[in-house]
Image: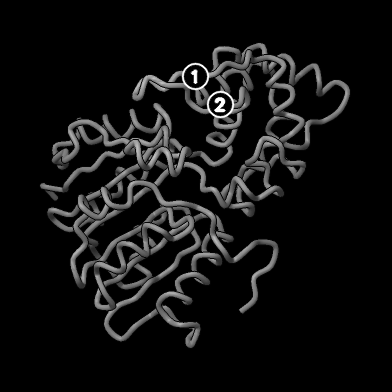
Amino acid sequence: MTFANFSDRTVHVPIMVDEIIELLNPTEGGIYVDGTLGGGGHAIAIYKKIKTKGTIIGIDSDKDAINRTESQLKKIFCNNNSDSLIHSEGAIRLVHANYTYAQEALKMLGIDKVDGILLDLGLSSDQLNDTERGFSFNANGKLDLRFDTSEDEPAHTLVNRLKEEDLASIIFQYGEEKYARKIAREIIVTRKTKNIETANELAEIVRNCVPKKIPVNRRYNSRSIIIDPATKTFQALRIAVNKELESLKTILNIAPKILKQNGKIIVISFHALEDRIVKNTFKNNSQWNIVTKKPLVSSKTELQKNPRSRSAKLRCATLINE
């Protein structure tokens, strides 16, 4: 098997692994869905607990993530001696799809219900390091921002097509960016001369509209890392092109249909919009027993090792009523 246009070595560091294992409590022979496979770190940690009698269904809309993780899993569990990740009594099944298709994927695999679901939302470090897809602000590749590059409309098309008020609405609604109107206006002005094609081009436009400031990390009363002024705008466009909030609502509605009684779901979100959806879904649906009364956040030790975990919030609930 050969892999083109990407490295088969992940650089992504999985977040809150110990907390996930403690909450999910994966048991030998259990069946678990990792709906955001990414670099495979969480899936590997879970699989080590369920042994070869259990099953992990790893789902990701990013084909490169599927290929990369398959390569890593074979090195760990198959010693590269077999093309199959399917064992006699268990399996690691990898599915290239959006996690909203989890129910269909399970049906195709002959699985009715699972013991647990994990969703680690947002970007992986592997995607940020991919200069061809525009996730990094300084990338000279196309401003794409899609997790699945075979689906829907890339961000550069959206940016060059939408009206000023529609751009401002997306940036304000999904990025919670107070300079949204100014940014949208500058995008329109720039478009009169040339189309905006790369991440770097858009980032420079935004940086000229948003003052740079060094935030204070209130959790530790100390200076935090500098957040690029383009962060919220890129977040907004990424959410829009991938329909991330709609997908999150869909999987949360599907979850009770595919979880066993007392099965658990864990969701790690990275901004208030996602966290609010998860919180309200758990709170307003009597099928869920909320395990984490307040969201878990990364420890000080984890923050020092992995600053990208700074905005992560973990919520967990148990299905109590089918």
Query: Label 2: which residue?
Result: 227
The residue that label 1 is drawn on is 215
Is residue 32 toward the left or the right of residue 67 in the image? left
Mark 1 residue element:
loop
The correct choice, above or below, for 172 with respect to 256 in the image is: above
The answer to whether residue 166 is left or right of residue 34 is: right
Mark 2 neighbour density, 10 Å: few (under 14) some (14–19) many (20 or more): few
Query: The residue tagged with tag 2: helix, strand or loop?
Result: loop
In front here: 124 or 31? 124
Marks 2 and 1: in contact by CB < 8 Å?
yes
Labels 1 and 2: the sequence-earlier one: 1
The residue shown at (42%, 30%) is 271
**How far from the left and from the top, in percent, is residue 173?**
50, 21
**156 relative to 165, above or below:** below
Q: Label 2 is placed on what type of residue?
A: Ile
Q: What colour-coding does the image apply?
A: one colour
Sort mark 1 into few (<14), some (14-19) or many (20+) by Cα contacts within 10 Å.
Answer: few
Residue at image position (55%, 29%) is 236
Determine which quarter of the picture holds residue 201.
top right
Residue 111 x, y percent position in the rendering: 28, 69
Residue furthest right in the image: 193
Question: Residue 264: which numbered mark, if any?
Answer: none
The CA span between labels 1 and 2 is 8 Å
Percent across and percent down for residue 146 are 60, 45
Q: Is residue 197 above or below residue 45?
A: above
